[in-house]
Image: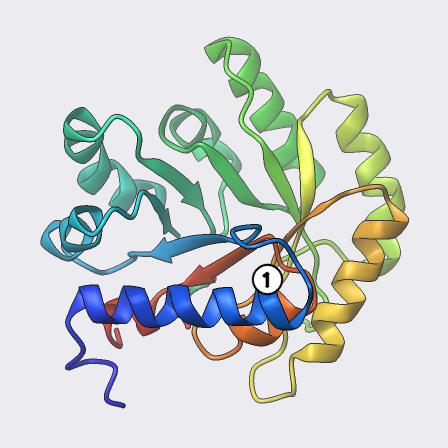
Amino acid sequence: MDIQSDAPATALSTVRDAIARSERIAGRPAGSTTLIAISKTKPVEAIEALIEEGHRVFGENRVQEAALKFPALRARYPDLQLHMVGQLQSNKAEDAVALFDCIHSLDRMSLARALAAAMDKAGRRVPCFVQVNIGEEEQKGGCAIADLPQFLDQVRALDLPVVGLMAVPPADLEPSPYFALLAKLARAHGLDQLSMGMSGDYENAVRIGATHVRVGSALFGSR
Ligand SMILES: *Cc1c(COP(=O)(O)O)cnc(C)c1O
């Protein structure tokens, strides 16, 4: 099927059905996976097409782009949920805390301190996923696996609401072993939410326990 020529409504129901099927195969409760529609680089009209189908949960990877697109949408649809899934600079922490309902890219202490200060100032606690560099790739963001126990201790000491782990497995490798490793790390640290799986691999991720899948091109067409 050509994803790009798929109308947004069709793409959404295709992805929803695939998630439901994977939940069933894994013996998980129906609806236990949150689909985050990653709308980076896509225009507001494309987002609205999914909103009209009843979808409410979106993700962006840049603070500036989200700040241009979402405040007007939120004014019209107050129940929208916006997730930050990209690398976040500490100097954008205040903007991020104001804009987003969840942050998936907490990966270093400088950012943790900036987010904690921004949340105190705003009087708003924004749930965070700790991003793990699950494939130990040099160029990739995320906390090193070996540093995770200490990082979680330090972040929790700042009173940041850490809800789970997030990862992007290495491109071009079978992702399932990385999903399984992330799930194991989360269990070991008493975290029950898992942000993993994108357009190419979200069904596998759901079977392995993803509570949040981040799907862009399968919904909106290629970028
Ligand atoms: C862009 C992006 C996605 C979505 O990728 P698709 O392959 O288009 O589904 C998911 N997660 C992160 C962190 C991203 O930057």
**Viewer can see residue 205:** yes
Q: Is residue 96 left or right of residue 119?
A: left
Percent of width and height locating residue 180: 77, 69
Percent of width and height locating residue 81: 37, 36
Q: Is residue 42 left or right of residue 130?
A: left
Position of the C terminus, as image quadrant, is bottom left
Q: Nearer the viewer, residue 22 or 199?
A: 22
Name the residue that disc number 1 marks. Answer: 196
Percent of width and height locating residue 45: 9, 53
Percent of width and height locating residue 94: 44, 24
At 38% from the left edge and 69% from the top edge, which residue is drawn? Answer: 15
At 80% from the left edge and 67% from the top edge, which residue is drawn? Answer: 181
Farthest left residue?
Answer: 45
Q: Is residue 107 left or right of residue 99?
A: right
- Quarter-of-image position of residue 140: bottom right
12 above or below 75?
Answer: below
Q: Is residue 28 left or right of residue 221?
A: right
Q: Nearer the viewer, residue 219 or 127?
A: 219
209 above or below 129?
Answer: below
Task: Identify the amino acid type marked 1.
Answer: Met
Element carrying mark 1? loop
Q: Nearer the viewer, residue 33 or 110?
A: 33
Q: Quadrant of ligand 1?
A: bottom left
At 60% from the left edge and 67% from the top edge, which residue is drawn? Answer: 24
- Quarter-of-image position of residue 179: bottom right
At 65% from the left edge and 79% from the top edge, which residue is drawn? Answer: 175
